[in-house]
C-alpha cells in the first residue's frame, strides 16, 4: 500500500489562499492513494448489530398458543417466524408494548398491545399479549374469530410507554389498572419476581366484580413469593361480602376494597412510603378521575405516567359540543392522491382512515408517540381534541398539526397525511 502523504495544517493566522489550495490537492492525493477495499457493512459493527436486534423495523411473529380466560379475555403467545426472516425476538422492558399490523378485509390497521409476559420469556423466544373482546370492536372481534395457532402477524419492535426508569421514577410504583389495563402490570410483577426489574409495585386493580379480574390467581402467587409486590382488588359493582363467596381457595388472603380508586385508597396503601410514582393503564375516563385524586394528594405531574388507553368516547367529555355530533366528510391529501371519506364524530379520524382502507402511520393510538402526526388543512373548529388526551407539542398546536388517533370530527375535515 502506498505511503499516504502527510498534511501539515498551517496556523489559521498564516492561512493564505495559496496554502489553502495546496491543502485541497494534498487531500486529493490521500483519496487516490487510499485502499479500494470495500468497507464492512454498517450492520457488521457490534453496536449497530445490537441496535438492529433490539430495534428492528418490523418483526414477523407466529401464534404458538391461545389461552382462553373465563372473563372475556384471550391470551396469545407468539414465537419468531423464521420462515419470514425473524430468528429471535427483540428484548423488551416490562411496561413496553408492540404495535401489530392487522388486515381486516381491505382495511390495514395497527393496534398497540402491552406485553403480558415477563421480559425473561423474550430471551426464550416468547411474547404474550392479552386482549379483551369488545362487542362491536373493529379489531377485537376479528382477532377472537380468526387468530389461532399458526396465524402469522407482523409487529413493530418493542416500544416504550410505561416502563420503569430509576433515574426518572420513584423507587415505588403505585399501579392503577382498569379492565384490560392490567397487562403491563402483570408483566412488571413477573419481571420483579424474575429479577429483571428492581422496584416496589403496589397494584390497585379496579374491576366491576372479582370474577372480572384476569390473572388473579397468577398475581396472587407472585404476591406470596415476592415481598416487593402488593395487589389490591377494588370492586365497583360488588360488595366484599359477596366477593368472598367466590370459590377461590385464597379469598381470605386477598386485599379487597369497594367503590373506585380514590385518594383515600391510594393513601391507605402508601402510608409508609415517602415517595412514589403513579402509573395508569385502562379506560380514558379512569385517567381523568384518577388525575383528580392525584391532585388531591399533591402528586407532581412528573411522577404520573400513562399507558395506552382503551378507545376514547368523546361524548363522555364535558367539553364535547354535543350539538355537533354527527357524520362528516374527511378529505385526505396524500403525496400521490386526494381521497374523501365519511367519518363519525364518535370515532377518531385514524379509525375512519383505517375503515376506508387508507394506510395511516400509528403506534400508541393515544396521542403520546406522535407517530400519526398530520397537518390539519381545514379550520381548527372542524375537529374536537379532548384536553385530557391532547399530548401535542406547543408548536404543533400553534401551527395546526394534529394526532388523528385522538382527534374527532365536528365538521368537514381536511388533513394532509404525511
Image (cartoon, grey):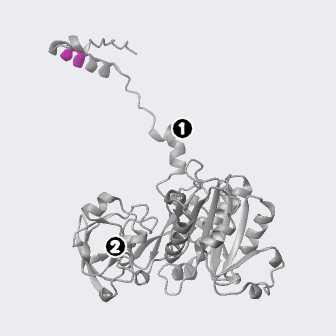
* Location of residue 324 in the rendering, given as x and y in whole percent from the top left corner: 30, 86
Q: Which residues are magenta?
A: 20-25
Q: Residue 201: percent from the left, percent from the top?
A: 67, 61
- Image height of 117 relative to 314, above or below: above
Residue 389 is drawn in which quadrant?
Answer: bottom left
Q: Indicate which disc residue 46 carries.
A: 1
Residue 22 magenta: yes
Residue 97 quadrant: bottom right
User: Rounded to the nearest whole Å, what is the CA distance between mark 1 and mark 2?
Assistant: 38 Å
**Residue 130 appears in the figure:** no
Q: Is residue 79 above or below residue 381?
A: above
Q: Position of residue 277 (x, y in %)?
A: 59, 59
CB of mark 1 within 8 Å of CB of mark 2? no
In the rendering, which numbered label is found on residue 358? 2
Quadrant of the snapshot with the N terminus = top left
Q: Is residue 364 visible?
A: yes
Identify the residue at horizontal 64%, vertical 87% (top origin).
237
Amino acid at each position: 500500500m502506498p505511503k499516504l502523504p502527510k498534511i501539515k495544517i498551517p496556523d489559521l493566522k498564516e492561512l493564505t489562499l495559496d496554502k489553502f489550495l495546496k491543502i485541497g490537492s494534498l487531500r486529493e492525493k490521500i483519496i487516490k492513494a487510499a485502499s479500494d477495499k470495500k468497507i464492512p457493512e454498517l450492520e457488521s459493527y457490534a453496536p449497530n448489530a445490537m441496535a438492529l436486534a433490539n430495534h428492528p423495523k418490523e418483526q414477523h411473529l407466529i401464534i404458538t398458543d391461545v389461552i382462553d380466560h373465563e372473563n372475556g379475555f384471550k391470551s396469545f403467545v407468539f414465537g419468531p417466524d423464521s420462515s419470514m426472516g425473524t430468528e429471535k425476538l427483540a428484548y423488551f422492558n416490562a411496561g413496553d408494548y408492540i404495535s401489530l399490523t392487522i388486515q381486516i378485509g381491505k382495511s390495514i390497521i395497527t393496534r398497540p398491545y402491552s406485553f403480558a409476559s415477563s421480559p425473561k420469556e423474550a430471551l426464550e423466544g416468547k411474547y404474550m399479549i392479552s386482549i379483551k373482546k369488545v362487542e362491536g370492536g373493529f379489531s377485537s372481534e376479528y382477532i377472537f374469530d380468526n387468530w389461532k395457532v399458526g396465524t402469522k402477524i407482523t409487529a413493530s419492535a418493542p416500544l416504550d410507554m410505561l416502563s420503569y426508569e430509576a433515574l426518572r421514577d420513584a423507587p415505588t410504583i403505585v399501579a392503577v389498572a382498569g379492565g384490560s389495563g392490567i397487562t403491563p402490570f402483570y408483566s412488571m410483577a413477573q419481571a420483579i419476581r424474575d429479577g429483571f426489574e428492581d422496584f416496589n409495585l403496589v397494584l390497585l386493580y379496579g374491576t366491576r366484580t372479582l370474577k372480572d379480574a384476569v390473572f388473579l390467581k397468577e398475581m396472587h402467587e407472585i404476591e406470596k413469593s415476592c415481598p416487593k409486590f402488593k395487589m389490591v382488588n377494588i370492586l365497583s359493582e360488588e360488595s366484599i361480602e359477596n366477593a368472598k363467596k367466590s370459590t377461590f381457595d385464597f379469598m381470605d388472603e386477598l386485599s379487597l376494597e369497594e367503590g373506585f380508586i380514590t385518594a383515600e385508597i391510594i393513601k391507605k396503601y402508601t402510608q409508609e412510603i415517602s415517595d412514589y410514582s403513579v402509573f395508569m393503564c385502562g379506560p380514558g375516563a379512569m385517567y381523568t378521575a384518577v388525575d383528580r385524586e392525584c391532585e388531591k394528594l399533591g402528586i407532581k405531574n412528573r411522577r404520573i405516567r400513562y399507558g395506552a388507553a382503551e378507545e376514547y368516547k368523546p361524548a363522555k367529555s364535558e367539553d364535547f359540543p354535543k350539538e355537533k355530533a354527527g357524520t362528516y366528510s374527511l378529505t385526505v391529501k396524500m403525496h400521490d392522491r386526494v381521497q374523501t371519506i365519511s367519518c363519525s364524530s364518535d370515532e377518531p379520524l385514524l379509525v375512519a382512515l383505517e375503515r376506508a382502507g387508507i394506510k395511516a402511520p400509528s403506534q400508541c393510538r393515544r396521542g403520546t408517540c406522535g407517530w400519526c402526526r398530520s397537518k390539519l388543512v381545514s379550520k381548527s373548529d372542524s375537529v374536537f381534541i379532548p384536553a385530557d388526551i391532547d399530548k401535542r407539542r406547543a408548536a404543533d398546536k400553534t401551527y395546526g398539526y394534529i394526532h388523528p388517533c385522538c382527534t374527532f370530527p365536528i365538521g368537514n375535515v381536511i388533513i394532509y397525511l404525511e
